[in-house]
Image (spheres, rainbow, N blue to C red):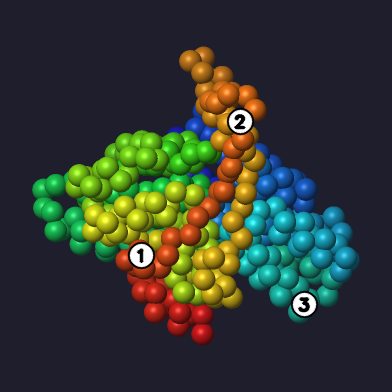
Amino acid sequence: VKVGQQHYRSIWRDGDVFIIDQTRLPHHFAVQALESLEDVYTAIRDMQVRGAPLIGATAAYGFALGLAEDNSPKGRRHAMQRLRSARPTAVNLAWALQRIDRLLDTQPPGDWYATALTEAERICDEDVAVNESIGMHGFEILRDVANAKPGKTLNILTHCNAGWLATVDWGTALAPIYRAFDQGIDLHVWVDETRPRNQGAALTAWELHNHGVRCTLITDNAGGHLMQTGQVDLCIVGTDRTVANGDVCNKIGTYLKALAAKANQVPFYVALPISTFDPNIRTGSEVPIEQRPGEEVIRVAGSDEQGEAGSVQICPTGVNAANPAFDITPAKFINGYITERGVLSRADLADIGN
Ligand code: MRU
């Protein structure tokens, strides 16, 4: 994706590994080098990088950096365990680490670092190709819905950030939107702010706005009203883990949007690479849900009139806050799963698991 005149991926290697520090967006575009296993662990834990596919890609580089520090079997185990513990919900983290770990089994320790590094790069390149393909399949859905209302704007609602910042490039939920926009479809996106960390406001709105896609930021509570009054043609969201029965784990608040969509006959799609599908878990209730600090609910981050970043407290001192970061949308609320293999049904997904 282009930022200004320069093309960026959300992670890249140029000697060191570089990321865009997403905790500083949209106010500052800051590139940061990751030089060690601990740098990578911290970047994932503190959400400088986030979004399921990008967490996986970053962890893959982290594994290589860990092996550069210690390429003994103990070092390999440590790197794997440390990175795995950075965040619990997105399955891409374990997926990327396991993929590299299996490959290392076939190599002598002296080759582990180079093998892991090459595989991390392959994971990144594949992610870009997979998302481009998700974009093409999802585009067909958007085109069909747009064709059904000629001369009118196509209104799409999305939650959290499943754009290029959540992946290596393109995004999952936003890939079809970028493609449809680039193909000249008249569209507009309702962007849920996505409290408490505001990935919608800070990241999705920033991405779409940069690309020239017309979008409107809304509070997390507005979606139901917009759907009820016919202002949403379809919803597309990403996922951190979609399981064998088709249940979808995604950013907290996704479930409420799916309920509202079902009640108002608004199609609800989930976009995901197959690497986010976890056939080892049967139903959504078994997915580990990340519980984040209450402090994220108590305080809101932003920038003041002078452009200085900071945060303000929004409730009385001493109030308790709960902060479950993800929820489960049951498969029965989902119209289709947009993957690199096409738009799949719940039954198609179950087949992949077998
Ligand atoms: O907590 P985050 O910002 O990592 O959560 C991200 C999401 O919920 C995304 O929707 C999901 O990872 C899909 S990303 C293509």
Mark 2 vs mark 3, CA separation in Å: 50 Å
Q: What is the distance, in whole Å, between disc 3 and disc 1 at their CAs?
A: 39 Å
Q: How many marks?
A: 3
Q: Nearer the viewer, residue 34 or 155?
A: 155
x and y percentages locating residue 335 in the rendered image: 32, 66
Q: Secondary structure at mark 2?
A: loop
Secondary structure of residue under mark 1 = loop
Q: Which residue is mark 1?
A: 334
Res 19 seen here? no
Q: Which residue is mark 3?
A: 105
341 horizontally vs 264: left or right = right
Image location (x, y in percent) of residue 276: 53, 65
Q: Is residue 245 left or right of residue 43?
A: left
Q: Nearer the viewer, mark 3 or mark 1?
A: 1
> Which mark is on residue 319?
2
Q: For residue 205, what is the image quadrant?
A: top left
Q: Taking 301 as reference, is 118 above or below it?
A: below
Specify whether tag 1 is near ligand 1 (CB below 8 Å).
no
**Residue type marked 2:** Val
Q: Position of residue 195 (x, y in %)?
A: 48, 39
Which residue is rendered at x = 57% and y = 29% of the image?
299
Q: For the residue labelled by badge 3, is the local secondary structure a helix, a strand or a loop?
A: loop
Give the answer, above or below, for where 271 lies relative to 152: below
